[in-house]
Amino acid sequence: MSMRFHLRSGALAGAFVFLLSAAFAPLAAGQGRGVGLPDFTDLYEKNSAAVVSIDVTQKSKRGRTGMPELSEDDPFYEFFRRFGQVPPRRGQEREPEAQSVGSGFIIGSDGLIITNAHVVDGADEVTVKLFDKREFKAKVLGADKRTDIALLKIEARDLPKVSIGDPDKLRVGEWVVAIGKPFGLDSTMTAGIVSAKGRDLPQENLVPFIQTDVAINPGNSGGPLFNMKGDVVGINSLIYSRTGGYMGLAFAIPIDVAMNTVNQLKEKGRVTRGRIGVQIQPVSKEDAAAFALDSPRGALVNGIEKDGPAAKAGVEVGDIILKVDGKDVRNSQELPRVITMVRPGTKVNLSIWRKGVTKEIAVTVAEMKEDAAAPPNRGGSTPKEKAKPNKMGLMLSDLTDEKKKELDVKAGVLIDDIAPNVRGNVQPGDVILAIVNRGVSTEVRTVAQLNDLLGKMDKGASVTLQLKRGEQQFFTTLRIPASE
């Protein structure tokens, strides 16, 4: 019984099919204390006219062969058929079209509309239907798949528009409302509460989703999520479901993330994102202890891009980034979200934890480029004689100068094999670069030196190692077995 995320708006072909749905979920106390269930009538009357339905037509590419249309009595038709290439017959039925639906909302009285990028992805024609039943052909001004936001424009004036709210002020348990077109049913309102904030979802690390139990179904995608003041605080985007329908877990893109994307699309037709050139990992409880940090927080730097912004500013591997321009980085997922929102060329101030003290470093943010996948490099030297496991259950060998050059390391020892009882993110072919203890990082140069350092540690103690695996560097924490 696997759960799955649904990101695509579905086609309406015969039956109602799509992505996200419409039932009334909430069963809680009202917005205020000591009062009954909230009344949503004024909110609906004020905002429903600014919500639109979006119909998308996509021509099927199936059957396009690049061959000329021929009738069956044409001599060339038989020629192609004998060689297994059947050309399309002249007068065949029209090319099939796929129909899908979604929702959106007006942010500009001159016809600017926001929806999800996946609603209009691959569209040949986009039709926007207003609350008063007027229909317009829409132009897609731009779309960004990373944040799942698209900006549309229709030729209309003096349209009602929504007001934009502040999702940071949302509180878990607060009432919220969605208006959209689930299963093709225009102007449907559903209500629920905020279930969680800043939710991380697989492969969606740039969006801190708002989780709600508002009934969201196929057709709601791209529609607004309102707070009780009638301000848009999010865009309904996806659900978590076994069946493809509503099961009480809905997710909305915070409106500030969406508006950052929209403003860039309006300004230059594309979205630029900032980067500082670091690789990071979460700070575990064991990592925090190893780096003498009071609690697991921030983002641990395990790699730095050569000649990148962070390297030029003096950021080092083993630093823990705690704040960006005074804003706390509570976990490693938050850092990319904060940095990618910064306009390239802007200087930001990083508060980092290094060797037991906090330092301030100014970094000039660069523009993020398409990531190039680096091929894995598991190469290592093969010892003449198989080493015995050390105190941690690792079989190690020293690196020759030739092997150091091949692996692009100045020092380190190679992990040839690991004992079956070793638990942690470590594998043969990894290179141990350093050992971290009580905030101090010690470079590892030889197997004898590492084993000597381990020999001074108690059984059952946690050991944090800096490893290099292929082109990636990271920190991992292992525990010295309590018994041999």
Image (cartoon, rainbow, N blue to C red):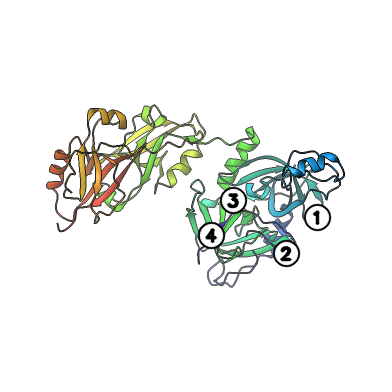
Three-letter code, disc 3: Gly
Three-letter code, disc 4: Arg
Which is more toward the observer, 261 or 432?
A: 432
Q: Which residue in the protein does label 1 denote?
A: 132
Q: Is residue 138 visible?
A: no
Counting every numbered tag in the picture gives 4
Q: Residue at x 28, y 41 (%)?
A: 466
Three-letter code, disc 2: Ala
Three-letter code, disc 1: Asp
Which is more toward the observer, 385 or 289?
A: 385
* Distance in Å between CA atoms under marks 4 and 2: 22 Å
Q: Which residue in the protein does label 3 denote?
A: 165
Instruction: List x then y, in percent, for residue 143.
Output: 63, 41
Instruction: Find numbered disc 3 in the image and state the secondary structure of the residue it sits on.
Output: loop
Marks 4 and 2 in Cβ contact (< 8 Å): no
Instruction: Find numbered disc 1 in the image and state the secondary structure of the residue it sits on.
Output: loop
Of the image marks 2 and 3, the number of the one nearer the N terminus: 2
Instruction: List x then y, in percent, for residue 149.
Output: 61, 45
* Distance in Å between CA atoms under marks 1 and 2: 26 Å
Q: Nearer the viewer, mark 1 or mark 3?
A: 1
Label 2 environment density (alpha carbons within 10 Å; few <14, some 14–19, many ≥20)? few
In the picture, the disc for residue 4 is 4
Q: Nearer the viewer, mark 1 or mark 4?
A: 4
Instruction: List x then y, in percent, for residue 77.
Output: 81, 42
Q: Is residue 40 visible?
A: yes
Of the image marks 1 and 3, the number of the one nearer the N terminus: 1
* Distance in Å between CA atoms under marks 2 and 3: 36 Å
